[in-house]
Structure formats: C-alpha cells, structure tokens
Amino acid sequence: MHPSQRGWRWCLTALLAVSCTGTPAPAPTPTASSLTGELLTVTSTQASVSLIRYGLSDGSASTQPAPIDPEAVNRSSVVGTSIPDAALFLTAAAGTAQAYRLDAGASEAIPLGPPLPVAEGSEPLLSIEDRAAIVADRGDVWILPLPGAEAWLLAGEGSWAAADPEGLSVVYSPDDRHVFMATVRGGAAPEALFDVAGLQHSLGPGTSPLELVGVPAWGPAGLAFLVRAGDQFAVFVRYPDGRTVEVLQENYANVFRVPRISWQPGGNLLAIADDVGPSGAVLRVFDATTSQLTALSLAPVGFAGTAWAPDGGSIALLTGSGELVVVDLEGDWLAHRETNWRALLAWSADR
C-alpha cells in the first residue's frame, strides 16, 4: 500500500474506530517503537491548571502547578514549542499575555519578558517559536524577540501575523486580505507582499471574497497560511521565491474551526490537523519539495493539539476527547493512550 493511502485504512483512530464502510473494526495496534523525549501537556479544573511532563519511553508522568489561568485553557489560548533543554509556552487570559520558559528538570516555569496587556475577553492570535513570540490583539501585532525577551515590540497591525524562522521579520495583515512584511527592529517601511484576492481562482467561481484566518506557520520551506471564502476553506504555502500553491481545499467546511498547521523541525513537511471538512478530522502532511499530500490518521472528535518529534520522524496528536496518538510518517501508530489532557504544548528531546 502506498504511504499516501495508508492512513485511510482507518476512519477513526480511537476506541470508536470503524472501517471506512461503516463496518466495526478494531483500532490499529501500535507498532514496536523506541519513542524518546518528553511531552509537555496541560490539564485543568475550574480552579487550577497543571503542567504534565510525560516520558514517551517509559510512560512516566510528573505534574506541577502551571502559571496559566483556567480561562486560557478552556478557550485554547495557550501555545508552546520546544528548544534545547527547555520548553516555551505563551498564554493569554484576564487581560494579560505572558510567555514562559520551563527548563528541563525545573519545578517552576519562569516568565519570559514582561506581561503584555490585551483586550479583556479577547481571543488574540498567539504564536511562539524558538526565536519569537507573537500576540495579535484586535488591531496591534506585538512580537517578543527570543531568547533575549527584553520587551514586546509593536511590529504591525491586525489580528493575523507570523515571524520568520530567525525572528528578524514579521508578516501581518491589517484587514485579513492584504499581507505586509516588516523588520522586527524597524527601519525600512513595510513591504507589500500579496493580496489573497489573487488566490480567488483556486477556490472556484462564485465563492465569497477570501479572508485570512487561523494561525500561519513560517518555516524554512515557506509561509503556510489558511484562507476562507464562505464555507470554502483552503491551505496555501508561499515559497521563498514568491510562488504560492494550494495545498488543501475543503468544501462545505465548518466555519467555526480552522486547522492547526506546523512545520517539521528543520524539514519541508507541513502537518495539517484538519477537523473542518465534511469527511471528518484528518491529520495530513504536505511535502513542500514533492508537493505530495499524505493522510496519516483520522479522529472521531477533532484535535486539541499536535506536536512534531524533535527528529521530525513522527507526530503526537491529542484528540478533542483527550486521547494521545503518536503516528510515524507512514501512518503507523507508535503509541496510544487515554488521558485527561486539554492541550499539547511541546515535544522535547531527551536531556
């Protein structure tokens, strides 16, 4: 079976697994693996939030209090990433956004930079990578350069933004249509990059005007972003040479959710955790070198988070019901367990 078809052997990747024809079928058995590293996850009650470190090699777990407002977890206003010897995460709730660093073996997360005021009750765009954290909150785009984390810098305007892999430039859109690029430290005037109206033909005639939605992802292979036109939805990649290709289109999509997209560490694969289409929730990867789109796994109740393995060889997937599944790039299961986790923040390498 070709790898691009392997993920379609199962219509559901949890205990509710059924075959694609509707006939009951057992969930696939995890293959023998040598998973290493540690997942950083979040669980919560009405009164508190906890960080969980989960060792993939032996299934060990440790729990510690998290400096996160429960409101943030309930509204998914928390994101994270891994760097050598630490995990970074960014959260926003109760009128404040704050970045944190959790060092390997540390019992407490420490704040990175000052708190950033955000509009009370808003749901700002949040993004964090090893070189920058971004908050786009009802008109202003703020960036916190890392690892220095000296101050939040006003980098643009709008509610859509991303930083380049080196944290030197930022793209933003003031109107969810026109995209500009600016240097983080200022200087040159912002450069107009593109207007999503130029991609209208990709979604077909008669569709509503395109608008940018969701959280873009900027990696060495290009800028990945999401657009919506009425109930049509698409994922695009803009390559460094300016070419823009459509990666995925969903017709009659759920307009209340958007896919989660993330680039493979140091690689050219884009993970797309898509639970907006009529075919159900699907984890796919797009190869920016070959333009091949591969389905790896499906889930019955959507996705609550994804995280790439540090070596880029597998993906941890947290479903909306809290089940953890780890799949390799052939679609084979490497791990599966039920949890009470609410979010998946990072996959750190063994220290």
Image (cartoon, rainbow, N blue to C red):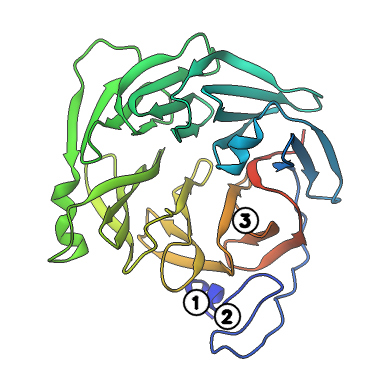
Based on the displayed image, in which of its 4 quarters is residue 136 positioned? top left
Q: Residues within 10 Å of mark 3 (few under 14, many from 20)?
A: many
Image coordinates of residue 209 in percent, x first then y, are 17, 53
- Vertical position of residue 273 compared to residue 296: above or below: above
Q: Amino acid at mark 3?
A: Leu
Based on the displayed image, in which of its 4 quarters is residue 119 positioned? top left
- Vertical position of residue 117 compared to residue 287: above or below: above
Based on the displayed image, in which of its 4 quarters is residue 52 positioned? top right
Question: Which of 312/127 is in front?
Answer: 127
Q: Which residue, given by chain and number where applicable, does mark 1 sit on?
A: 5
Q: Amino acid at mark 2?
A: Arg
Q: Quadrant of the C terminus?
A: top right
Image coordinates of residue 179 in percent, x first then y, are 23, 35
Q: Residues within 10 Å of mark 1 (few under 14, many from 20)?
A: few
Contact, mark 1 vs mark 2 (Cβ under 8 Å)? yes
Question: Which of 231/128 is in front?
Answer: 231
Q: Which residue, given by chain and number where applicable, does mark 3 sit on?
A: 317
Side of 206 where 222 appears, left or right: right
Q: Which residue, given by chain and number where applicable, does mark 2 sit on?
A: 9
Q: Secondary structure at mark 2?
A: helix
**Comes first in the chain, label 2 or label 3:** 2
Contact, mark 3 vs mark 1 (Cβ under 8 Å)? no
Image coordinates of residue 265 in percent, x first then y, are 53, 42
Side of 112 where 127 appears, left or right: left
Please state which of the two labelled residues, at mark 1 or mark 2, is closer to the viewer: 2
| Total numbered labels placed on residues in the image | 3
